[in-house]
Image: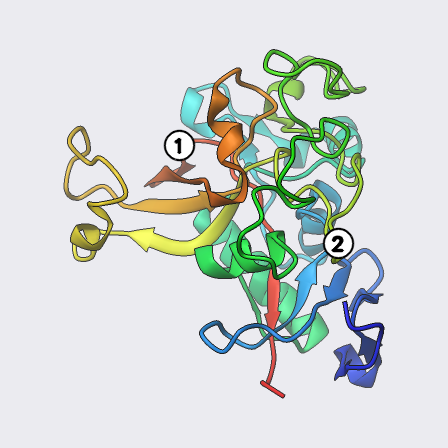
Amino acid sequence: MSGGAETEQGFHGNTVEIGEEFAPCDGCPAFIRVPQSPADLRPITFVSKFELTWNNYWQAVDAGACPAPILGENFGRAIDLNERSELVAQLRLDWPIAELNDAEIECYVAWLESVSGADLALPTVQEWEWFASSGNPSRRFPWGDDIDPTREALSTRDLVGIPFASPWSGGRPSADIFPHVQGKRVGSFPPSEWGLYDVLGNVTELTEERITAQNRSAYEDQFDFSNNPPQLEEALMKGYQIGQWSSPVWQDGIERTSRVSIYSYGFSAPVGIRLVIVGERQ
């Protein structure tokens, strides 16, 4: 980082130096001021320090701006959180939220923009790779090129001595909620060089990029669509959720891009959210 030599006008007129964090309101996500983004990317000024948590989202619910998610809606065992305050209290202990659908994400972003005055967005794939690598595009992992099991929530079935333990450990909430709790509590592992936490291996993070019937041909060299109906829309994800499987795909690190299907009820797999703030290029 540049040691604070560069500054950016932050939320509500606050000046924020590179590497410093700022939250637009009490309970809102904390954002890290990042160095200038490359010219081929949008002028990103801030990246959220953690993945969006249940506590963050519930602030918009408390404000009456967004609906409470209905857990398990697509599996026929829906849990209406509006009627389960004791379970909401357990979820609000900084677990990353990975149960939102498109409409709920859009609602939350609109609400946070209204209270912060910032221009918020999901990152593109290229933008995610840029901030995940702290501006070093050749990096394999957020911390460098070598495997370091102390840095991220990697699977214990692949590597020895990794502190993730198992999907069922870590003080998870009660039995009817824990299937919907993904990863570890945010900030469980050391941050990246730019001060961002959990960019690899906690929950998979959604990007704004979508594969549709109209643009699918542009992705055919990257993905196999042979088993997918042409009308199925998909979203691209980064930061593979490697804590739950023994597959060696975690070795792809930052480079790994995966897909998730989009249905009327939401996404076909849990997806986490990390937001960026788009400003003016200096």
Q: Quadrant of residue 49?
A: bottom right
| Residue plotted at (72% across, 52% down) | 196
The image quadrant where one finds the N terminus is bottom right
* Residue 268, disc: 1
Crowd tier of the residue under label 1, counting other residues whose Cα lies within 10 Å: few below 14, some 14–19, many 20 or above:
some
Would you place residue 144 above or below residue 176 in this image? below
Please tell me which residue is depicted at 54% across the width and 56% down the height of the picture: 137
Vertical comparison of 62 with 11: above or below: above
Q: Dot 2 lies on which element?
A: loop
Q: Name the residue under label 2.
A: 193
Indicate the position of residue 60 as horizontal and vertical percent values. Answer: 68, 55
Q: Disc 2 marks which amino acid?
A: Glu
Quadrant in the rendering for residue 162? top right
- Lower sequence index among marks 1 and 2: 2
Spot occupied by residue 178 in the image (x, y as percentages of width and height): 66, 19
Q: Report, in whole angstroms, how far the alpha carbon at label 1 lies from the one at label 2.
A: 32 Å
Q: Residue at horizontal 79%, vertical 40%?
A: 187
Q: Where is residue 174 in the image (x, y as percent from the top left)?
A: 74, 16
**Residue in the image at 72% along x and 29% along y:** 184
Residue 188 in view in this figure? yes
Q: Where is residue 81 in the image (x, y as percent from the top left)?
A: 64, 33
